Amino acid sequence: MQEDAKQHEAEDKVRREEIETINQADSIIYTTEKSMKDMEGKVDKKQLDAIQKKLDELKKSMEPEKRDIAAVKKRLDELNEVAQKAAVEMYQKASAEKNQEGKKGKKDDEAVDAEVVDEDK
C-alpha cells in the first residue's frame, strides 16, 4: 500500500494542483462578478469591458472538454491583473471624493470656543 502511494505520489500532486487551480478560478470568477456590480458607475466602462472579456476567457478555459490547467492559470493571472487595476482606480476615486468632502466640511464645522455658565447660582 505504501509502495502504491509512492508510485502515484507525483500523479497525486499534479491532480491536487489542478483541483486547487480550478477551485481558485471558480472563486475568482464569483468574486469578480460580484465586484463588477459594485464597480459600475465608479470605474471607466472600458475597464469593466476588459474585465468582462478576461472573465469570459477564463470561463471558456474552465469548460471540462477544453480544460487546460496552464491556460486556466494564465487566464486567472490576466483577470487578476485587470481587476486589480480597476479596483485601484475605484478606491482612488473614492478617496479623492472623500478628501474633497472633508475639505468642504471643515469650513462649515469650525469649532467655537465657549464657556458654560450656570445661571442658577
Image (cartoon, rainbow, N blue to C red):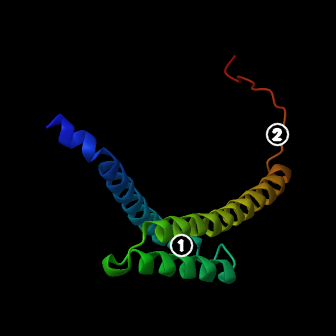
Q: Where does the N terminus fall, quadrant-wise?
A: top left
- From the viewer's perspective, is the residue at label 1 or at label 2 nearer? 1
Residue 20 horizontal side relative to residue 93, left or right: left
Residue type highlighted by circle 1: Met
Query: Residue 40 lies in what quarter of the image?
Result: bottom right
Q: Where does the C terminus fall, quadrant-wise?
A: top right
Q: CA distance from mark 1 to mark 2?
A: 41 Å
Q: Is residue 94 above or below residue 64?
A: above
Residue sitting at 82 percent across and 39 percent down? 111
Residue 32 in view in this figure: no
Residue sitting at 68 percent across and 83 percent down? 46
* Viewer-side residue, 104 vs 17: 17
Residue 25 horizontal side relative to residue 119, left or right: left
Mark 2 residue crowding within 10 angstroms, few (<14) / some (14–19) / many (20+): few
Q: Which residue lies under the disc numbered 2?
A: 111
Residue sitting at 73 percent across and 57 percent down? 95
Residue sitting at 66 percent across and 68 percent down? 86
Q: Which residue lies under the disc numbered 1?
A: 36
* Viewer-side residue, 102 vs 26: 26
Dot label at residue 113: none
Residue 64 horizontal side relative to residue 89, left or right: left
Q: Position of residue 56 (x, y in %)?
A: 48, 81
Residue 61 in view in this figure: yes
User: Element type at marker 2?
Assistant: loop
Q: Is residue 92 above or below residue 62?
A: above
Residue type highlighted by circle 2: Ala
